[in-house]
Amino acid sequence: MTETWQITCVTRIERSNPYERIERAGGPEGEGWTLGVNEIVCHIKNGARFWVDVGGQRSDIVIASLFGREYIKAQVDGDTPASLLSLPECVD
């Protein structure tokens, strides 16, 4: 069975480049998980599925690349991870 995780928050870092602004992403309250972007990329490559709610619709998280650097974004987004950047900040 494939692992499926909903992303409901992100931890941002201050960078002018939107492709590098997300440092970590996390799951729904109560589960209390956060993973670094590189960890999420590895999980996706190993078959796990991550998703985000975009306007009431489920959108899978996919791996994208810019100048050889991998990052994550919602499948419905263009180049930038706009849906993830619109999520609230994760609280430790």
Image (cartoon, rainbow, N blue to C red):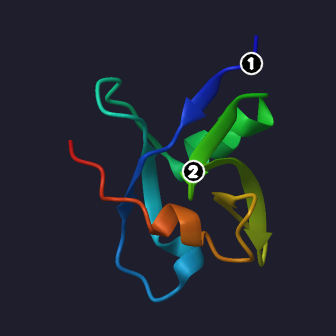
Q: Residues within 10 Å of mark 2 (few under 14, many from 20)?
A: few
Give residue 76's position: percent from left, percent from top: 74, 63
Disc 2 marks a residue whose amino acid type is Gly
**In the image, what residue occupies the spot 35% across and 24% down?**
31
Disc 1 marks a residue whose amino acid type is Thr
Under circle 2, the secondary element is loop
Q: Judge left or right: residue 84 versus residue 24.
A: right
Give residue 80's position: percent from left, percent from top: 65, 76
Q: Nearer the viewer, residue 29 or 63?
A: 29
Which image quarter is the C terminus in? top left
Q: How many marks?
A: 2
Q: In the image as oriented, which residue stretches furthest toward the top?
A: 1
- Mark number displayed over residue 2: 1
Under circle 1, the secondary element is loop
- Contact (CB < 8 A) between labels 2 and 1? no
Q: Nearer the viewer, residue 38 or 84?
A: 84
Q: Judge left or right: residue 85 versus residue 74.
A: left
Q: Quadrant of residue 49?
A: top right
The Cα–Cα distance between marks 2 and 1, rounded to whole angstroms, is 22 Å
Mark nearest the camera among 2 and 1 is 2
Q: In the image as oriented, which residue stretches furthest toward the left?
A: 92
Q: Nearer the viewer, residue 5 or 47?
A: 5
**In the image, what residue occupies the spot 52% across and 61% down?**
84
- Mark number displayed over residue 56: 2
**In the image, what residue occupies the spot 56% across and 49% down?**
53
**In the image, what residue occupies the spot 57% across and 48% down?**
52
- Mark number displayed over residue 25: none
Give residue 10's position: percent from left, percent from top: 40, 55
Which image quarter is the N terminus in? top right
Q: Earlier in the sequence, mark 2 or mark 1?
A: 1
Q: Judge left or right: residue 40 versus residue 60.
A: left
